[in-house]
Image (cartoon, rainbow, N blue to C red):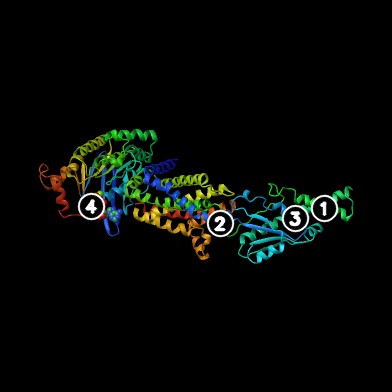
């Protein structure tokens, strides 16, 4: 793993007085699953929104697949896929309509979009519900659709912002296997979650973020080693040790 | 090309979502007609045939004079054949009584020929048509003025032709060269020219244009009600859809769109196109039902009415876009939409004719696109105006649309996230 697919240098973003992202730098290698962990309000989503060209950074540089987000956002948009933390779906439309629509928005032709939509629905175990109205889906199904849409247009880099929140172990497992399958296909993935075992299991490297800054970045194994025997301590122990026990807003 | 397909698919998606919402479709199509039916019914008593403008004509010449021929040619033979809004032309045989009636305010106006009318025309002397009119009766006065203008110009051209013909006839010896014979021949020709057409017939020698100024009431209440409600509901339906962009943001789908290959302008364009198409559907339904069910008369220039309607939709959709980029929440977008619609509709003359307002209020109303739209429709459909007269309204709507659109584009760029 040598080639850096994404390079982030000195990223800053404030909302009025609040420094949501306060000097973040890191790189993600090609084909890697990179975990971004942190307590509520750490600045993970804000970081992802800047990386995915939705939000303009106050300062800093982002290079994705060789393209600068600032100078060539369009090139960046053509190679990324986003699964937002909040469900981003048209509840009145069918699963297929949702998928095809966003496929179109990713620049695909009608037939191509439809074929890929069916393929991705199948991947998420939803091919039988393609014509069903998304609004009538269960929470887990909606989460899976939310993720499936991010795959439309065959992106090279995926931003997955808490894709498994609020779903049952079956759905979660299903999503896990899919994410691992995507990695095997060569996708690079940035993954955020509050489930430490999840991150431990999936991610090649993990960054722990707090107060808008990255306070640790390494493999799960190395992070655990910092506070004890990697076989005995959990990632959660590391997380709590690094970020403290006080509640966040 | 890619951007156009993006715009189209965003619009299509919005239309699909809209079509699935039964309640809004009902509100959008059926609700306006309930208002129209109600108001047509309420206004019915105020319009109608009784309010037809009457134009009175009289002459002081003895029978056999040229003026008798002229009046005979243009007097209304059968009132039931007139179109709504057309005036009735009445021949008053008693000049003095009619004149007194105008002075007493019983008649709005009178056009009278002098006693020496034929004589003057024959000898080429100047003669004057008299117009008496009530100072307040602007419409009647303008109509009489233009009839007088038409008569005099017609007579002048006829006279030139006849004089030339006579001198040819005299030259060739067909008519004896004495003045009595010439006079007789001239009068025969003039009479023939003036009474050439059957009274009220299609090719009457006199054409006259009635300039409409001021207030005339609609012959058919729907002619007023439909455009007013069209303006109000097209605007309202569009304004309410301002929630769309805010909703798209709150639904987080805007975030997805912003991170996809779609240009910011295409997102805005797509949402705009969706709103525009819905407005278009609305006006098509409005006019089709209006014409088939309510017998609405589009006036002299139906294309002008159509263009004005489309411009109304273009402007309303732009307003919605602007509202959407100004509002932070769906609730505020909706309240702003309702508030502006309910304020601007009556001010702009959608509920009752704004020419009933005091002048200062009419001036204030000019800042509403509604006022321009309704005055355009009223001119076209009630006052017999033609395409050119509606141009200021069309232009104004276009300017409003541009202003709203520019503000929306600027706001969207600075506040998309
Ligand atoms: N648009 C915004 N306007 C104002 N403040 C914001 C905005 N977006 C985020 N913030 C603030 O920035 C900080 C970081 O938020 P962010 O959503 O990035 O955190 P997070 O790490 O994703 O948290 P969570 O785990 O709860 O999702 C928070 O304090 C949040 O309130
Ligand atoms: Mg977050």
How far apart marks 2 and 1 lie (CA) works out to 44 Å
Residue beneath disc 3:
B68
Q: Which mark is residue B217?
A: 2
In the image, are marks 4 and 3 on the same chain?
no
Q: Residue B388 carries which label?
A: none
Task: Name the foreground residue: A103 vs B117.
Answer: B117
Q: Which of marks 2 and 3 is in front?
A: 3
Task: Name the foreground residue: B239 vs B92.
Answer: B92
Q: Which chain does the numbered disc 4 sit on?
A: A
Q: Position of residue A143 (x, y in %)?
A: 26, 41
Tell me which residue sits at (31%, 35%) in the image: A130
How far apart marks 3 and 1 lie (CA) works out to 16 Å
Q: Which of marks 3 and 1 is nearer the N terminus?
A: 3
Q: Regarding mark 1 in the picture, which secondary structure is present there? A: helix
Q: Quadrant of the N terminus of chain B?
A: top left
How far apart marks 2 and 3 lie (CA) works out to 32 Å
């Amino acid at each position: 793993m040598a080639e850096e697919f994404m390079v982030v240098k000195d990223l800053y973003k404030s909302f009025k007085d609040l420094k949501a992202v306060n000097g973040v730098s890191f790189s993600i290698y090609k084909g890697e699953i990179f975990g971004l962990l942190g307590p509520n309000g750490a600045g993970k989503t804000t970081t992802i929104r800047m990386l995915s060209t939705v939000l303009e950074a106050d300062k800093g540089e982002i290079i994705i697949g060789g393209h600068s987000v600032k100078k060539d956002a369009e090139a960046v948009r053509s190679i990324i896929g986003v699964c937002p933390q909040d469900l981003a779906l048209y509840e009145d439309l069918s699963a297929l309509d949702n998928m095809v629509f966003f496929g179109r928005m990713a620049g695909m032709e009608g037939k191509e979009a439809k074929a890929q939509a069916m393929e991705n629905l199948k991947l998420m175990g939803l091919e039988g519900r393609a014509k069903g109205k998304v609004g009538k889906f269960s929470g887990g199904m909606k989460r899976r659709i939310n993720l499936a849409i991010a795959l439309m247009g065959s992106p090279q880099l995926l931003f997955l912002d808490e894709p498994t929140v609020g779903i049952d172990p079956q759905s979660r497992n299903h999503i896990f296997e899919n994410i691992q399958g995507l990695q095997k296909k060569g996708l690079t993935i940035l993954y955020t979650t509050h489930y430490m075992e999840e991150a431990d299991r999936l991610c090649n490297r993990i960054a722990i973020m707090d107060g808008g800054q990255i306070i640790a970045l390494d493999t799960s194994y190395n992070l655990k080693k910092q506070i004890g025997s990697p076989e005995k301590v959990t990632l959660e122990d590391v997380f709590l040790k690094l970020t403290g026990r006080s509640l966040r807003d | 090309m890619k951007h156009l397909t993006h715009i189209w698919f965003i619009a299509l998606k919005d239309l699909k979502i809209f079509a699935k919402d039964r309640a809004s479709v009902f509100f959008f199509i059926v609700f306006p007609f309930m208002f129209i039916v109600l108001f047509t019914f309420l206004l019915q008593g105020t319009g109608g045939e009784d309010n037809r403008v009457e134009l009175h004509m009289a002459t002081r010449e003895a029978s056999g004079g040229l003026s008798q021929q002229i009046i005979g040619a243009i007097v209304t033979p059968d009132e039931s054949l007139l179109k709504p809004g057309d005036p009735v032309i009445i021949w008053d045989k008693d000049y003095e009584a009619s004149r007194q009636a105008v002075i007493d305010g019983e008649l709005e106006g009178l056009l009278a020929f002098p006693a020496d009318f034929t004589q003057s025309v024959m000898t080429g002397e100047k003669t004057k048509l008299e117009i008496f009119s009530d100072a307040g009766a602007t419409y009647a006065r303008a109509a009489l003025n233009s009839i007088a203008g038409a008569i005099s110009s017609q007579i002048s051209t006829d006279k030139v032709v006849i004089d030339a013909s006579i001198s040819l006839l005299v030259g060739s010896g067909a008519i004896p060269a004495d003045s009595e014979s010439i006079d007789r021949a001239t009068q025969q020709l003039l009479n023939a020219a003036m009474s050439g057409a059957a009274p009220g017939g299609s090719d009457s020698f006199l054409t006259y244009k009635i300039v409409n100024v001021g207030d005339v009431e609609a012959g058919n209440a729907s002619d007023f009600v439909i455009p007013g409600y069209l303006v109000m509901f097209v605007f309202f339906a569009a304004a309410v859809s301002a929630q769309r962009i805010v909703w798209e943001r709150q639904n987080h789908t805007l975030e997805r769109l912003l991170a996809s290959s779609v240009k910011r302008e295409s997102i805005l364009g797509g949402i705009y196109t969706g709103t525009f198409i819905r407005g278009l559907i609305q006006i098509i339904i409005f006019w089709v039902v209006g014409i088939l069910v309510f017998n609405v008369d589009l006036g002299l220039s139906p294309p002008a009415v159509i263009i004005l309607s489309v411009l109304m939709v273009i402007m309303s959709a732009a307003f919605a876009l602007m509202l959407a980029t100004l509002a932070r929440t769906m609730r505020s977008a909706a309240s702003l939409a309702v508030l502006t619609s309910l304020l601007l509709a009556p001010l702009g003359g959608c509920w009752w004719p704004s020419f009933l307002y005091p002048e200062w209020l009419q001036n204030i109303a000019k800042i509403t696109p509604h006022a321009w739209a309704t005055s355009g429709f009223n001119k076209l459909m009630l006052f017999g105006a033609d395409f050119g007269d509606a141009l200021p309204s069309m232009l104004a709507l276009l300017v409003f649309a541009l202003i709203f659109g520019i503000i929306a584009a600027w706001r969207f760029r600075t506040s998309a996230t």
